[in-house]
Image (tube, rainbow, N blue to C red):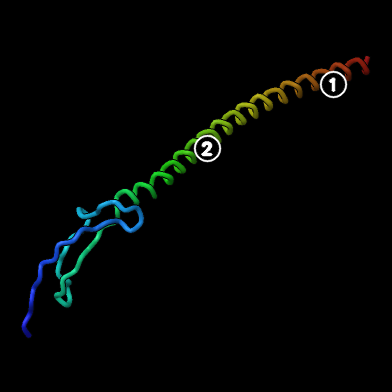
Amino acid sequence: MPEISVEVSFEAYCDRCGSGICNNVNTRTSRNRGYPQITIAPCEACISNAVDPIIDEVDNLKNEVDNLNYEVNELKEINIDLKTDIRVANEKINELEERLFNLQQS
C-alpha cells in the first residue's frame, strides 16, 4: 500500500493555564502499529501550581509535629517533677506518721 508522509508544524499550549508547551511535545512512531504519535508532557507551570500548595501543607504539618513534640517533652518534664514532688510528699507523710506513732506510744 502506498504511503504519503506529510510534515506538520504546530504550536502546543496548555489547555488549563495557556502556557506554551512546545518544549514538552515530542513525536514518535507507535510501537505496535507504526503510526506517528505525539506525546505531550504535563505543563510545568500547572505541575508547579499543583505541587506548591502540597509542599506548603507538608511544611505546616512538619511544624505542627515539631510543636507537638515540644509539648510532649514539656509534659514529660512536668511528669518527672510531679513524681519527684509525690515522692517527697510521701516521705514527709511517712515521717509525720512515724512521729505521730511515737507520740502516741509515749
Residue 97 badge: 1
Observer-nearest residue: 65 or 76?
Answer: 65
Q: CA distance from mark 1 to mark 2?
A: 48 Å
Observer-nearest residue: 102 or 82?
Answer: 82
Residue 8, placed above or below residue 34: above
Q: Quadrant of the C terminus?
A: top right
**Mark 1 and mark 2 residues within 8 Å of each other at the beta carbon:** no
| Label 1 vs 2, first from the N-terminus | 2
Q: Residue at x 60, y 27 (%)?
A: 77
Q: Position of residue 95 (x, y in %)?
A: 80, 18
Q: Position of residue 2 (x, y in %)?
A: 6, 83
Instruction: Describe the element under mark 2 as helix, strand or loop.
Output: helix
Q: Which residue is mark 2?
A: 64
Q: Residue at x 45, y 43 (%)?
A: 58
Q: Is residue 45 left or right of residue 66?
A: left
Q: Position of residue 73 (x, y in %)?
A: 56, 30
Observer-nearest residue: 64 or 87?
Answer: 64
Crowd tier of the residue under label 1, counting other residues whose Cα lies within 10 Å: few below 14, some 14–19, many 20 or above: few
Residue 52, placed above or below residue 1: above
